[in-house]
């Protein structure tokens, strides 16, 4: 899988709610806020299960009710379409959980 070009990342990142380009364009990142700690943990469990299924694992950190998620593709040495697809999927999971 080839990394996306910088201009491709810039174009697509604006279509994914609250995701940002970080670390010289080699990563994308979003911070998710929750009203409840256990819901934050459920979110991490669901994205972790998805990551295992597709064998593409984000960096995740949990600070009480704040979950930070970062994506990159190691083999491609940058952001790929798979990272973009994961970001969109994680937003869907988040939106389902906060209803």
Image: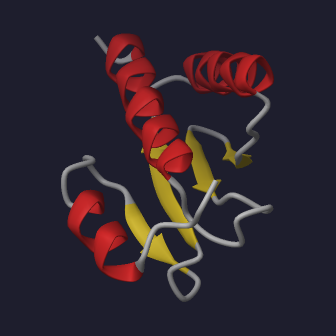
Q: Is residue 42 above or below residue 18?
A: above
Q: Position of residue 34 (x, y in %)?
A: 45, 31
Percent across and percent down for residue 85 are 45, 37
Q: At x 57% / y 38%, what residue is drawn?
A: 65
* 94 lies left or right of 42: left
Query: Which quadrant does the C terminus fall into?
Result: top left
Residue 24 quadrant = bottom right
Instruction: Choose top left, top right, bottom left or bottom right for residue 39.
Output: top right
Residue in view at x 58 percent, y 83 percent: 23
| Residue at 45% in and 41% down | 87
Q: Nearer the viewer, residue 34 or 47?
A: 47
Front-most of 67 and 28? 28
The image position of residue 71, as x and y in percent, is 61, 55
Which residue is at a point 71% across and 24% down the rendered structure image?
54
Percent of width and height locating residue 51 = 72, 28
Comparing 19 with 61, the one in front is: 19
Determine whether 54 is above or below 33 in the image.
above
- Relative to 83, is 50 on the left or the right? right
């Amino acid at each position: 899988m080839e990394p996306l070009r910088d201009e491709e990342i810039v174009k697509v990142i604006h279509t994914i709610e609250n995701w940002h380009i970080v670390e010289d364009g080699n990563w994308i990142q979003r911070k998710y806020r929750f009203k409840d700690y256990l819901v934050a943990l459920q979110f991490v469990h669901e994205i972790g299960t998805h990551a295992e299924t597709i064998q593409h694992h984000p960096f995740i950190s949990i600070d009480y009710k704040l979950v930070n998620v970062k994506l990159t593709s190691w083999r491609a040495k940058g952001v790929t379409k798979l990272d973009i697809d994961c970001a969109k999927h994680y937003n869907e999971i988040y939106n389902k959980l906060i209803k």
